[in-house]
Image: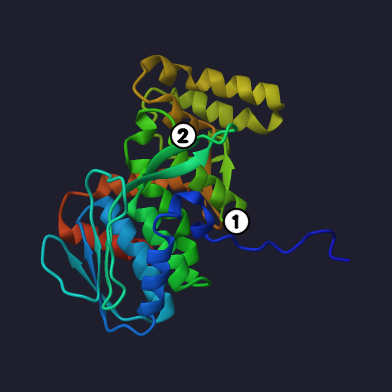
Amino acid sequence: MNGGHSAHVMRSLLELEAFAPIADNLRGISAELATSDTVTLLVPPSPTGAVTSALLEAALLDAGIPYRRRFSPRQVSPPCIEIEEGKATDMPTECSPNPISLKLAPFFTVGLRGSDGNPQRGILSTVAQAAALAELIAPDGKRTRRLRPWLLAGNWWGDALDQGYDPVYSSLRDHLREEGLVRIVPLPEVKSPNLANLKHLDKEREVSTRESWSSLDADGKAEALSVLVMPEVISDKTSTSRLEELVWHRIIVNNSDIDLHSNMTTIRSRWDGSTSTSAEMVESLLANSI
């Protein structure tokens, strides 16, 4: 008897509807990478660029594929993967598998479907696209798997959550949880959260809520969180969607004491616009020191 547990079959990111427009492109590129000459990554010097690059580099390292990193703006020739930022387009950019020439740029896609089947659209960031390609390049790669939860950074740093619900973020977050890569917990269950995004929270109340948390029942916990978050709601500085994630849906990555939102806040606050800081960001992500 195995206790009734069936082995969990890993679902690929490419099985999510959001990735449908680029799935074939990414599969084609991944197949070519195995025999490619040194591939050049052209990276914007930004937090999003750094995380996108780190996800790709982790997979290339795991798979033993040679690459070099360059920061834009500059010209590069194939084989290359260019990371572009800016406004999302309605369609993914064209790509050519041989020689490899891929541009990752944000585009609008279906994140989830409502109960009535209506598509809810959102933006698929370059970070999430890189995570899907990384998964193809090194499905069992240690670095690749460890960095996968960072695929949320693009949507987290974007502004969709400030304008309301972000269906792409929600579908990616739920995918990570279903795959057992993260746990979703309320704020009081995070050991030492970075509260920079919750400036109006009463710090003493936050500590006392955490201390009494385990003794509360479900109703007590709901009440305690409502009271804790009230000053933030009244201040109206943070959107309801973002607040929900920061207070009710903190993301704990397996084997980590620090939640992902705190890490995303920390890494972004370090960025000063320079390529050297961007390079340090990539290195610290790869070294697991963030």
Which image quadrant is residue 168 in?
Answer: top left
Q: Note whether 177 is above or below 185 in the view shown.
A: below
Count the numbered circles shown.
Answer: 2
Gap in angstroms between the C-alphas marked 2 and 1: 21 Å
Label 2 CA crowd tier, 10 Å (few <14, some 14–19, many 20+): many
Q: Secondary structure at mark 2?
A: helix
Residue 246: numbered disc: 2
Which residue is labeled 1 in the image? 179
* Identity, as a three-letter code, of the amino acid under mark 2: Leu
Q: Earlier in the sequence, mark 2 or mark 1?
A: 1
Q: What SS does tag 1 mark?
A: loop
Q: Nearer the viewer, residue 208 or 73?
A: 73
* Crowd rating for badge 1 (residues with CA inside 10 Å; few <14, some 14–19, many 20+): some
Question: In this rendering, is residue 87 above or below 212?
Answer: below
Residue 47 on image: x %, y %: 27, 51
Is any part of residue 236 visible from this angle? yes
State the residue in front, 46 or 108. 108
Counting from the top left corner in percent of width and height, residue 173 is at 51, 46
Left-right relation of 265 to 75:
right
Q: Nearer the viewer, residue 34 or 200?
A: 34
- Quadrant into which the N terminus falls: bottom right
Q: Is residue 289 visible?
A: no
Look at label 1 and name its amino acid: Glu
